[in-house]
Image (spheres, rainbow, N blue to C red):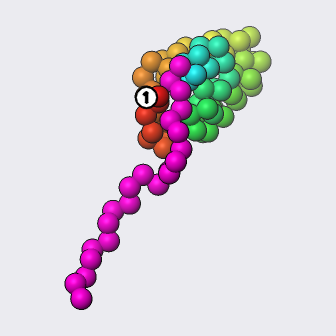
Amino acid sequence: GAYAAPQPATNMVLNVPPKSRIAYVLLAIFLGGLGIHNFYAGYMERGVTQLLISVLGGSFTCGISSLVVWVWAIIEACITTTDKNGVPFN
């Protein structure tokens, strides 16, 4: 018989509905200083980094680092269009 070449893997995440862009942006605006929007989108490392910078750094800098993280979150809200798996926001 004929040999069939294996097909390349497609999207490994099946039946996962896309996340809401509006929810992502609102989380970034209101809770972005804590990285909550990144946890929502699956970017755990970024979320933990933002949370630690805000909480630990904010206690040493009188909140200045928390403000920096919030600005970072607003920028992410403007430029991030997919979740961690590459699924576009709905």
Residue at 42% over, 23% down: 79
Asked which quadrant contains residue 64, the reply is top right
Percent of width and height locating residue 75: 48, 18
From this view, report whether residue 52 is shown above or below residue 28: below
> Can see residue 72?
no
Percent of width and height locating residue 19: 54, 32
- What residue occupies the far left of the structure in this picture? 2
Asked which quadrant contains residue 25, the reply is top right
The quadrant of the image that shows the N terminus is bottom left
- What residue occupies the far right of the structure in this picture? 59
Q: Residues within 10 Å of mark 1 (few under 14, many from 20)?
A: some
Q: Is residue 80 left or right of residue 39?
A: left
Residue at 68% over, 23% down: 34
Q: Looking at numbered disc 1 in the image, what kind of residue is underneath it?
A: Thr
From this view, report whether residue 30 is shown above or below residue 12: above
For residue 67: magenta? no
> Can see residue 41?
yes
Residue at 65% over, 13% down: 30
* Pointer 1 residue: 81
From this view, report whether residue 17 is shown above or below residue 15: above
Residue at 60% over, 26% down: 37
Percent of width and height locating residue 41: 56, 34
Kind of element beneath mark 1 = loop
Q: Main secondary structure of the magenta part?
A: loop
Asked which quadrant contains residue 33, the reply is top right
Q: Nearer the viewer, residue 29 or 70?
A: 29
Percent of width and height locating residue 10: 38, 55
Q: What stretch of residues is rendered in magenta? A: 1-22
For residue 21: magenta? yes
- What residue occupies the far bottom of the structure in this picture? 1
